[in-house]
Amino acid sequence: MFRTMSDREAVFLKQQEERLSALEKRKTDRKEANQSIEQLNEFLKKFDSIKQEIDLELDNLVKLSSPAEKKSHLSAAQGRVNSLQDLLNDALSYLPAYDLRKSQDAVTTIHENIARIQQVCLPKKKFAFGKKKNAATNSNVTENKETSAAEKFAKYTGDVIYENKSNQTLDIPKEEIHKKDVLLKNLTNCTVNLHSTIGTLHCTNCTNCTFSTGPISGSIFLESCNGSTYHVTCQQARIHTTHSATFHIHVTSKAIIEDCKELRFGKREQFYEGYEDDLVEAGLCDTNNWDDVDDFNWLSKDPSPNWRTI
């Protein structure tokens, strides 16, 4: 029993304060929950709108006959896909796991649709040589191919760019690349460490290099990266015109290769301190389809000769 009225009042006041504090906390939690719902709904609305624009662009593309018009619609669709990926990257911090996975799968499907439509509607030109050809002709063909590759490499960009380096170890600071789109270009005999959550990674013309990346919430795009080794975690991998490369990979969707040969794929086993936290932040799941590789140059049901597991 309480000895005095003041003791009772003190206990009563304390209980009142605790009730008011709990009530205020519930109000704050409800407010934050409502804000999160509004933020999510706004994201889904924008995401669906851009996705519908892409679908419409691709539907119109397949009905066209002019190559110039097809290229224009394809370019417009690819630009909207970039906007879609940027929107998704900006939402990583608040999207629920289910919505994140669903959105990532949608972006992956769009990439696959664009690649297949491009292959059907705008196939790459194949060189055909007659029986007679001279050194000048071969020289012109080589020069044209090199010029075309140089133009292709020049069109890519990123929030963070490292290029034209040889025989260096690049330990790129986490704060510099966190959730950014990264471009690595014209690297030779380099070791590159990108230990952070990344938006997308694009590598072009990187030879005899070793790469160790943090989880990539979007895709990794590689072109002409020969003789290199990758320790990489990503939502999707797109690999073009690359040979004699090794991938220790964790990919939640799949790897897609085109115009490649002598590629090797194995499970990622090399990590860094803080990797697990970055994996959660990137919204990537434990699913690893490291040995599920689509070869766009191999339509047979038999295994592709252009890649193997290790």
Image: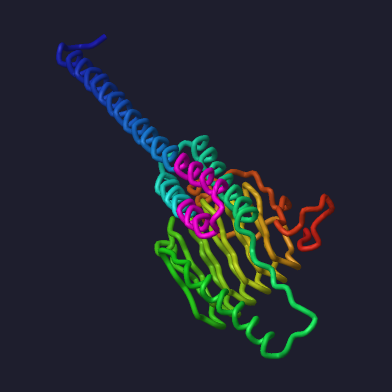
- Quadrant of the rendered image containing residue 178: bottom left
Above/below status of 137 relative to 110:
below
Q: Find the magenta span and give its range.
A: 51-77
Residue 245 locus on image (x, y percent): 69, 69
Q: Quadrant of residue 219?
A: bottom right
Q: Residue at x 81, y 53 (%)?
A: 300
Direction from residue 102 to residue 79 in the image, left or right: left
Task: Decide if residue 29 is on the left or right side of residue 300.
Answer: left
Q: Is residue 215 visible?
A: no
Which residue is outermost to the left? 6
The one of 60 and 173 positioned closer to us in this rendering: 60
Which one is in front, 274 or 188? Answer: 188
Q: Is residue 129 magenta?
A: no
Q: Nearer the viewer, residue 231 or 22?
A: 231
**Which residue is situated farthest in the bottom direction here?**
135
Where does residue 247 sit, x and y in percent of width and height? 68, 62
Magenta stretch, main secondary structure class = helix
Judge whether residue 88 can be spotted in this image. yes
